[in-house]
Image (spheres, helix red, strand yellow):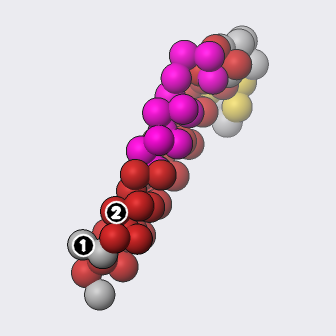
Amino acid sequence: MKKRHQQKLVILSIALFILFNAPILLLFNSSQKAFGFPLIYAYLFIVWGSSSLMSFIIFKKFDE
């Protein structure tokens, strides 16, 4: 694996650690709805899905 791909994965891991940390999660803990779901569920699934997509793109470029 190239050094820059490793660096991208480390940056992604740090970003996810920050985004899934309790103070950030508590910002979205309200009774509001987004897409018919509570706001915190929408936030969790959007962050999780986007991180999965970003890691897929990084690993796909690694295979080339």
Dot 1 and dot 2 residues touching (CB under 8 Å): yes
Residue drawn at (63%, 23%) of the image: 24
Identified at 71% across, 13% down, the residue is 30
Which of 34 and 48 lies nearest the eye of the viewer? 48
x%, y% of residue 2?
30, 75
- Amino acid found under the numbered disc labelled 1: Met
Task: Name which residue lies at 71% across and 24% down.
Answer: 33
Q: Which residue is mark 2?
A: 6
Q: Looking at the picture, how far across and down is residue 16, in whole percent?
A: 48, 39
Position of the C terminus, as image quadrant, is bottom left
> Circle 2 sits in a helix, a strand or a loop, which is it?
helix
At label 2, counting other C-alpha atoms closer than 10 Å, the crowd grade (few under 14, some 14-19, many 20 or more) is some
Question: Can you tell which mark lies on residue 1?
Answer: 1
Does residue 53 sit above or below 48 in this rendering?
A: below
Residue 23 position within the rendered picture, expressed as x and y whole percent measured from the top left: 62, 16
Label 1 to label 2: alpha-carbon separation: 7 Å
Q: Quadrant of the N terminus?
A: bottom left
Picture residue at 59% right of the left edge, 21% below the top = 25
Q: What range of the chain is rendered magenta?
A: 12-24
Residue 36 on the magenta segment: no
Query: What's the residue type where badge 2 is placed?
Result: Gln
In this rendered view, identify the residue nearer to me: 41 or 57: 57
Query: Who comes first in sequence, dot 1 or dot 2?
Result: 1
For residue 1, above or below residue 19: below
Quadrant of the image occupied by residue 8: bottom left
